[in-house]
Amino acid sequence: MKIIGIIPARGGSKGVKDKNIKLLNGKPLIKYTIEPALDSSMLTDLVVSSDSKKILDIAKEFNDIHILSRERTLATDNAPMSGVILDVMKQLKIEKDSNDIIVLLQPTCPFRTSNLIDDAINFFVDSESDSLISVYNVGDTHPARMYSLRDNFLNSLDVTNESTNRQDLTDIFHRNGYFYITYAKNFYKKKSFYQSRSLPYIMKKDGYTNIDDANDFLLSEFIIKNNTL
């Protein structure tokens, strides 16, 4: 059984130009994912999939990485991640009934360490779950505190609990992008990491940024320079 880390890094980005190769504290963002992945004791294979020559050239600086070119149609703003994962599995010739494990490692998560990678994989392997997704507890950023608009007036998303004290609310979790893990055969069936029995890998909310915009970059750089994680 192989445990395959997949780093999907397209060239374009709406929020931050050339985000995946933008320098974060002097180092291209994608290297913050490649380096700990290569140091992982659990991953048997590592793949970088991209439509960008610049990104693939960075990946080529490292040994023991599968470099896979991605079609432009799988690198647009609207292209689903499921299509990218399926393309990687097809190029690697992974069978549809394979028990190989695939680990999605998004390059926008700069604080993912090799120890975290190994811990998440071990947590999944030792469980009887169909997949693992990293999450954090939303705390007071809860649906009971949220509203939509109806005729320009606030409309509670959870009327029953709108006035419930925070400590009495049911725990709600938000995925943070750091880990998505499942068996290849499961992904082929559902085209998703969210399965019937998805195990939560609960992480701290603060510090583990998933970089989407310029503010996330600034926060991540502050954390790195001040070692505040």
Image (cartoon, helix red, strand yellow):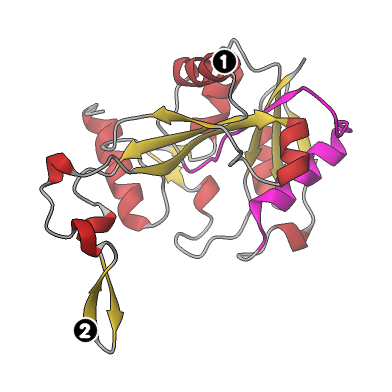
Q: Secondary structure at mark 2?
A: strand
Please identify the quarter of the rendering in which residue 149 is found: bottom left
Mark nearer the N terminus (2 vs 1): 1
Q: Position of residue 96 (x, y in %)?
A: 86, 34
Please identify the quarter of the rendering in which residue 194 is found: top right
Residues at discs 2 and 1 in contact (Cβ within 8 Å): no
Considering only vertical position in the picture, is 166 above or below 225?
below
C-alpha distance separating marks 2 and 1: 51 Å
Q: Secondary structure at mark 1?
A: loop
Considering only vertical position in the picture, is 176 above or below 111?
below
Apparent side of residue 203 relative to residue 107 in the rendered image (left or right): left
Considering only vertical position in the picture, is 183 above or below 195?
above
Apparent side of residue 64 relative to residue 55 in the rendered image (left or right): right
The number of numbered badges drawn on the structure is: 2
| Residue at mark 2 | 153
Q: Position of residue 36 (x, y in %)?
A: 52, 22
| Residue at mark 1 | 40
Residue occupying image coordinates x 76% and y 23% = 100
Please state, as top left, top right, bottom left or bottom right, where the C terminus lies in the image: top left
Magenta stretch encompasses residue 102: yes
Magenta stretch encompasses residue 80: yes
Is residue 91 or residue 36 the one in the foreground? Answer: 91
Please state, as top left, top right, bottom left or bottom right, where the N terminus lies in the image: top right
Counting other residues with Cα less than 10 Å from the Cα at mark 2, is it few (<14), some (14-19), or many (20 or more)?
A: few
For badge 1, the amino acid type reads Ser
Considering only vertical position in the picture, is 214 above or below 228?
below
What residue range appears in magenta? Answer: 79-108
Mark 2 or 1, which is nearer the eye?
A: 2
For badge 2, the amino acid type reads Phe
Q: Position of residue 201 (x, y in %)?
A: 44, 28
